[in-house]
Image (tube, rainbow, N blue to C red):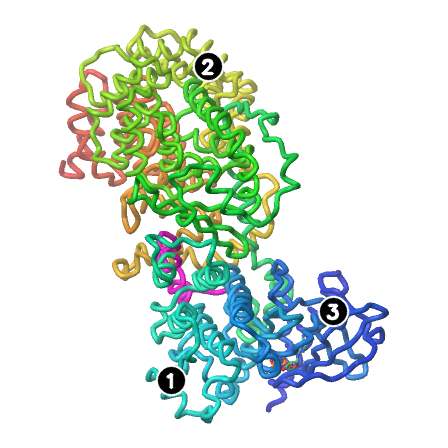
Amino acid sequence: MSNKTDKIDLMKTNIYNDWLETSINNGYINYYNYSEFKNLKPIGNGSYARVSRAKWRNTDGFFALKTFNNDKITLKEVVNEIKLQKELIPNDNILRFCGITKIETEKKYSLVLEYADSGTLKNYLSKQFNELDWNDKYQLSFQLASAVAFLHECDIIHRDLHADNVLVHQKKVKLADFGLSKKIAEASSNTSKIFGVIPFVDPKKLNDQGYKLNKKSDVYSIGVLMWQISIGRQPFSNDNYDVSLSLSIVNGKREEIIDETPTIYSDLYTECWKTEPDERPNMHKVVLILKSIIFPDQYIKINNSNEDNLLQISLDINDGSNINYDSNINNGQDKNDDLNVNGDPDKNDNSNIDDDLNLNNCIIPKIDILQESLDINSGSNINDDLNINDHPSTNNISNINDDLDINNYSMSIHPSIQRSSISYINDGSNDILIIDSLQDQPDWTVILKSNRSSIASIQTRLSKDSFSSIDKLITFIIEKHDKGITFDQIQQQIEQKILQLDLINGFVYWLIGNQGEPKYNWLFGLFYYYGIGIEENYIKAFELFLKAAENDYSIAQVYLAKCYNDGYGTEEDKSLAFTWFHKAAGNKSIIGQFYLGYCYEFNIGTKNNENKFIEWYQKAANNGNTTAKLYLANCYRLGKGINKNENKAFECYKILAEQEITDAQIQLGNCYHEEINKVQAYNWYEKAANNGNIIAKCILEQCYNIKISTKKNRNMKIKIHKKLYFKGLRMIGINYYNGTRIKQNYEKSFYYLQKAAENENKNAQYYLGNFYRDGTVVRKNTRKAFILYQKSAEQGFLEAQIELGHCYNKGIGTEINESKAFELYKITAIKGHLDAKYQLGYCYDKGIGTEVDKAKAFELYREAAEKGHITAQDNLGPFLHRNIEADLDIVTFNSIIIDKKI
Ligand SMILES: Nc1ncnc2c1ncn2[C@@H]1O[C@H](COP(=O)(O)OP(=O)(O)OP(=O)(O)O)[C@@H](O)[C@H]1O
């Protein structure tokens, strides 16, 4: 080895040593004084470390001290292991990392770990196997699978699962070394290591050393471990672990199923060890099935079906989830990789330890993301009268037994829901309830998601308060709509209300058994429509709305009309949309009155109604509907359908602005802006921005050079996570979308975009919005597209801002709101967006959201045409001929048409 290499190695070693020192000094890692450990007893040696058992000070229990060689590879992996460990939420089946100690005499660090009193699973099985019954074996498998599923949830792939890496303490599985040994092995290219564990290695890897181990590789190893747990000995114990065995496994050789093994268990592990990764279940499914084996009473047995069906049901659970979840991840970056890629001094000798330290935040517990998304949603722009007193009495909660009693649960609801039709699955973090095949509606399968606490509270409440609570919820929603909350604003309010009542699944569950009245049909449909507490399903939503609407339930008529208007769960039919809005309005639905006016204004399913919309807006406004008031005010401002009356408009905006209607706050700001009262204008824009209005934020940015932060208390972890992890995902996603491999990789692209969008990547949100708008890969959902554009626009993404303008202009996923469309086009045109300039010109030309101003229209058309906007070029000629009297710049016009050969 040259001197130079020696120096680099030394530098690297120092970097990791420094990192450890720094982490100890700043309290990131617990430090244990080595001299305070007593009764040290060696318990094992691995390839890279020796392990001792020890007591610390006068504490009762033992710790395990794992001491490594201090070479650079090992140290690097130890650092990575610590980072991974530190960021994981503690899990009962994962060996706890307690801290670090240093043997000063040897200048070596030791990891201080939880001690597992039964040693490795291999040892445990060899000693205890005869004591174990099937239930014990299922438990071991279940705990092991849960631990791996947990890692997968955190995007960590173990890659080295075998019976020596699984420890057992007090009959409990403790998974160890998930970030460590394989990295050392890989880094040191130690091929003998792989031979020691051949039966557990994914055959794809055995066949191709370049194959990248992935989540499905872990599933394979779990399958083999489940087999080992069933028999108590190592797989292929009579064979040499050599190339020949390896080849046989690649060619399909597997261990024999032990005779007395219950089929459901052997079916599961044989599924896991299938050669093709795509044919293996994901870990989540493995856990669910094991859970169903352990608690058979709590599981669905449709049509008294056998265990095979049960397996099938469990396997179906995730079918509606992310596309190719696991197989995508295989090709993407897992957390372990991130640690390597970003902090790998081997690849970048200049990398500094700060970068590495940042990586500590890479593993984001799901709960953080969830929390963040709850924060995002909290920017309601309408005064919310959620009453804290509505919260259900919680005095019974403390008495609730944590274990759900399915018997009481189902019987107290409805006789049509049979005990056998209910299943309850706990996957460790989330509980999933499955209710299948109601007697009178055999084709209905309902999947509910819940957490344990909400299930517990359902138990206490359903029998007593359900009627009044559900009726309260119905009243709440109708009142909100009547007051002016539109479709795109209501979901958040419903969710808040239900969350506040802590009854999300309770409602759905109750509704399934109580479908006798139109109001409950509608509410059930609403849950399907918005996907609240239940899988989103437009067809079912539509059917339920239709049923309730035909029974003259006016709010259902409004929703049915909305379905026809947008083509949700049915063919788009504007004329039927109009018919049902009309019926609802006739039925005295206030929101129905507003929407009828809206149909008249924008010629939805009806034509040539002149100024009828004013009449209906007026009616709804008189009944207290703020959206109708706002639309009416816009009409007064522009003289649309009514004599222009700017004072009246101003007064209206003022009243609404004071009621925190953000669109009115903007309009009021505009009024003041025009009067050159900048202070007042700023005041109102700022109020709207603080209420979450995106347009106001953009105006403030453009006119006042002020940025309103979107999310206060933004979680640092999310930022770093986004920066380091989703940067890559986003690029892959977008590259696939725009790139040459577009066809075959749509799904992959969709998956990455979805992940990145969930983590607030504005580009991803925009592109995903396009997917939903166009119905590419995923079922068309303009409402989702609109929400995604909103999120992206809020973060300042220009393309999303203009797309949002189109949504308001055409009513895509939201109500047509020409004033908002105009504002957005204005904002994006100023930023130089070519299409925005054309669209803004069109607004001035036709009086969309603003007064007609042909001169401005011409300027904008001209600019867009000059810069190559095809439609602007096409429209400029006809526009000028139409508006010749408008004293426009004919010379310029002529030069353009000569230039472009129009
Ligand atoms: N936390 C622990 N509690 C109890 N025993 C442990 C603990 N950690 C390790 N051991 C024992 O020490 C032995 C060596 O562990 P180590 O993790 O170093 O190596 P390994 O995982 O068995 O092998 P390799 O590092 O080559 O993959 C194990 O086989 C086990 O018997």
Q: Please say if the residues under marks 2 and 1 sit with CB atoms less than 8 Å apart.
A: no
Q: Quadrant of residue 670?
A: top left
Q: Quadrant of the C terminus?
A: top left
The label nearer to you, 2 versus 1, is 1
- Between discs 3 and 2, the one toward the N terminus: 3
User: Which residue shows up at 38% across the image and 29% down it?
Assistant: 520
Q: Give the crowd class for mark 2: few <14, some 14-19, many >=20 residues within 10 Å.
A: many
Task: Indicate the position of residue 200 as horizontal and vertical percent values.
Answer: 47, 80
Q: Give the crowd class for mark 1: few <14, some 14-19, many >=20 residues within 10 Å.
A: many
**Magenta part of the protein: which range?**
314-337
- Please give the label number shown on residue 249: 1
Q: Quadrant of residue 527?
A: top left
- Please give the label number shown on residue 532: none
| Residue 341 shows in the view | no
- Please give the label number shown on residue 21: 3
- Going by the numbered disc 2, the residue's amino acid type is Tyr
Label 2 sits on residue: 653
**Location of residue 317 with respect to 177 vertically, above or below:** above
Question: In whole angstroms, how far apart are the C-alphas of marks 3 and 2?
Answer: 62 Å
Q: Give the crowd class for mark 3: few <14, some 14-19, many >=20 residues within 10 Å.
A: some
